[in-house]
Image: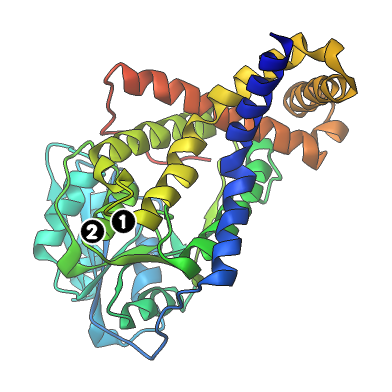
Amino acid sequence: MPAAAELIFWACLAIGLYPYGGYPLCVALLLAIRPLPVLAVPFTPRVTVVTSAYNEASHIEATVRNKLDQDYPRGLLDVMVVSDGSTDGTDQVLTRLAQQDPRVAFFRQEPRAGKTAALNCLLERAQGEIIVFADANSMYRPDTVRRLVAPFADPDVGYASGRMLYVDPQGSLVGDGCTAYMRYENALRALESAVGSVAGVDGGVDAIRRSLYRPMRPDQLPDFVLPLAVVEQGCRVVYAPGAVLEEETLTSEGAEYRMRVRVTLRALWALWDKRVLFNPVRFPLFSWQLMSHKLLRYLSFVPLAAAAGMNWLLVSRGWIYATLAAGQCCAALLALLALRGPARLRGFFLARYCYYFLLLNWASAVALVRFLRGEKQVLWQPRTG
């Protein structure tokens, strides 16, 4: 029995860590064996930037002007915004902008129905060959649109995602953790894009070929469902790291946790809706990518928690188990110090990373419970710091 317990422990630990370490190594190996570059030629198609806004009066004007001022041919770019039942003056700001610049179109969605319903409404009217999705508070670098649409010169590309660069001027607990996590995610996306398609994108700086857009249910997550729909149609989803969106991180632990639960819950529903993509016969490479990068990542807390518990039952079996148990204690202590310790210790990067890793996995656990209960989320408040 002890030998069986050890085998189960190592299996759980390997499965739990595989999405974070093993999978990226496998993709890097595949890249060395069989790279799949994207065709790179000058390309400036007609572009429509679409945004859904709810009570964003303080941000929306700067966001719209930021898109209008992009380094892109003026006659080939327009901006469309839906005000999703806003009550704070967002409509008045958008009305003024539409009067000042004919490239701006403004629509109101009433009653409030959520971002996905708003995007469905906009895509019925959009004229661009390429549709760029921008958040109501997203700020692009001057060349972001140009760099984001460049991969579409390759006819095999149906979706492109840029790089979200989190700015954390306060050096907050979740801010530092989020920034480090996104650096890791972006490195993995670069590897995935170089061998086929990325399994996850950054909402707010992504684009789709208009002909590939498919209307979604209001409860579906556009950032997740649309790329999967593109792969389902036989096209690639690629990463464009030069297309940069700068956004401030959340600085509140509660806000970050709620956002992670919401995103994970809607991602789990997206995986369920697009479960055909797990068929290795139809999608031999992407089914493995989706399983590894997304499903196993969201569920990794299960084998990791099992391994953590079994570790303590095996402490007497050898020095390695005692060392791992001590490591658990250190990680828990570091996370606690990051949350409640003195300011000098809270700034220690390992403490912040341990805390953020635990926050991500706890949010995944809560989201899974809500998913199994059949809960869905359509509406939420704007992202706040």
- Give the residue at x 24% y 56%: 232
Residue at 81%, 25% in the rendered image: 324
Q: Residue at left 53%, top 65%?
A: 190
- Where residue 227 appears, as percent x and y from the top left, is 31, 56
Which residue is pictured at 31% across the width and 88% down the height? Answer: 73
Which residue is more in the foreground, 183 or 88?
Answer: 183
Q: Which residue is mark 1?
A: 227
Measured in 3D between alpha carbons, the distance from the residue under mark 2 to the one under mark 1, in whole angstroms, is: 21 Å
Residue position marked by numbered label 2 in the rendering: 81
Q: Give 288 or 75, whichever is nearer the viewer.
A: 288
Q: Is residue 320 left or right of residue 108?
A: right
Figure quadrant of residue 132:
bottom left
Can residue 256 be seen by looking at this rendering?
yes
Q: Secondary structure at mark 2?
A: strand
Local crowd size for mark 2, using a 10 Å CA cut-off: few (<14), some (14–19), many (≥20): many
Where residue 344 sits: x, y (%)?
A: 87, 34
**On-image quarter of the N terminus:** top right
Q: Nearer the viewer, mark 2 or mark 1?
A: 1
